[in-house]
Image (cartoon, coloured by chain):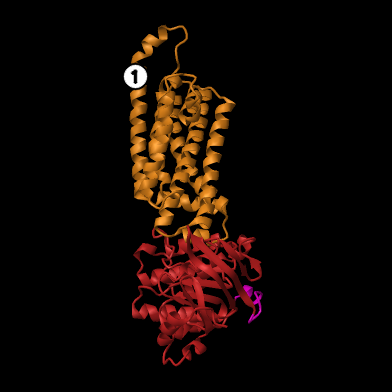
Amino acid sequence: MIRILAARELHSLFSLPSSWFMLGVLQFLLAWSYLARLDAWLQVQPQLALLANPPGVTAWVAAPMFDMVSLLLMVLIPLFTMRAFAEERRNQTLALLLSSPVSNTQLVLGKFCGLLAFLALIVCTSLLMVATLGVGTALDWGLLLANLLGLLLIVMSYAAFGIYVSALTSQPLVAAIGGLAGLLGLWMIDVTASDEHALWHILSPAFHFRKLNAGLLDSADLGFFLLFTATFLLLTIFRLQGNRQGGR
Amino acid sequence: MSGHILGYIQLNSQPVPPDILSSPAPDATTLIARNLTRHYGQYPVVQDVSLTLKRGEVLGLLGHNGAGKSTTLQMLSGILTPDSGEIEICGLDLLRAPMQAKRRLGFLPEVPPLYRELSVDAYLTFAAKLRRVSPDTLPDALADAKYRCGLNEMGPKLIATLSKGYQQRVGIAQAIIHQPDIIILDEPTVGLDPAQLRDIRALIRELGDTHSVILSTHLLTEVETLCDRVEIMRDGKLIYSDTRAHMAEYGDTASLEEAFMQITETEEEPAP
């Protein structure tokens, strides 16, 4: 049942012109960023060659690009997740799902998996872009895979958060603005906390991604992402249950 | 084109799907609701509503706007949970075994729950999968639902491009595609033109021959032509319950409309 709901969500995302537009814009920005970093690396390469332990092309080009991908997705994911439940409510199609033999958990996981498949495609295309460097030079695949994992985890967290906000309202625009405000808030508590050891950092997915972005795989970071995702998916399930019990 | 459905109905009234034959026996009670109560905040919307539905019966749920009809139907279809009370669908408790009970239900809300970006075939296939129609029987179920609702030619068309009447048929088709024992229709003829009205009513009547149907409406002509039994709600309470024929003879009234007005103005307690 989760697969059926995920396939429906994926189909719905791909049938929207706005999704293709956002994908196009994202690819354009990524390509720009990639070429700009590559150009910068080619210019500083002679100086880097003089260093004893110079950073490789993967660390110089790929890591900053993936960092940018995480920021762009933070802005774009609420635009994809806003429809999850808010639009179903607005169009009154939620009745079809709620009157069918589908549990709230299946419903939430189905939508989540569909969105995740869509977002994973974006992440994979950005990896493919960077992998083209492999034609001319050796790549640090460990760093690339750590970034890939980090991006998938942060996307998972953002999607879960966005779906939860979408379940709170029947207005997709409100869901998008609410999701964006929440994710920006989480990002800002990381970048604005001046004390490096402040607890605020721990709450921010961006903080945990930074270590994976640098190629450092820490089980605490993985645990954070999984916990963050599970928390918001559970809250969404409770919200749907609350809707059945509490009101319209 | 709108008249085609009558032909479909006559042609299609012969075969009875096997799973219907294995369902509850004729005259068996398919739905029992006991003492349903529901509040929105502090405001009571449905109070102590009890009703039953027999196989092959069309039950009309009547009442003015805001009487609690839609909330009652949403509880019966498992969308809303009652604050108290019980709902039994073909012997299955809807609250304790929702997955099994909901397989026996088909629901058409007041606004058909249509994904406008999908084709009719894609939408009905999705609805069938949601209701756990097996992949082996899905093509037959799809063809049957389209046939019964006069949608044979509409399969590849996008739902957004269909007229309101055809969208309503698609809404009914999603409610019957899994051959449920009980079909719940919330004001299924609102906003239709006279030809569409006639076709949809004919379809509902045909559904009443093989399924149990609960129909919410405030059109008394609909009750006259479709319903075997009538329940009337006012202010969230059931105030009248009887056969359509008995309702027509209520008091000294000359028509169902008069009877309805008299009942909603005078009745205080549910009639026996």
Q: Position of residue A4 (x, y in %)?
A: 53, 54
Chain A on-screen colour: orange
The reply to whether residue B160 is in sight is: yes
Asked whether residue B184 is drawn in magenta, I would say no
Chain B on-screen colour: red
What span is in magenta? Answer: B17-27
Quarter of the image with the N terminus of chain A in it: bottom right
> Crowding near pointer 1: few (<14 within 10 Å), some, many (20+)?
few
Q: Position of residue B186 (x, y in %)?
A: 46, 71
The structure residue drawn at horizontal position 47% and vertical position 19%, both measured from the top left corner, is A196
Left or right: where A4 falls relative to B113: right
Left or right: where A185 falls relative to B106: left
Q: Which residue is mark 1?
A: A40
- Determine whether B134 is above or below A24 in the image: below
Q: Position of residue A179 (x, y in %)?
A: 41, 41
Q: Position of residue B266 (x, y in %)?
A: 45, 82
- Determine whether B260 is above or below B171 in the image: below
| Secondary structure, magenta segment, majority class | loop
Which secondary structure, mark 1? helix
* Residue kind at label 1, given as amino acid type: Ala
Left or right: where A73 falls relative to B94: left
Q: Label 1 lies in what chain?
A: A
The structure residue drawn at horizontal position 45% and vertical position 19%, both measured from the top left corner, is A195
Residue in the foreground of this view, choosing between B100 and A32 = B100
Left or right: where A227 falls relative to A162: right
Q: In this figure, what is the number of numbered marks?
A: 1
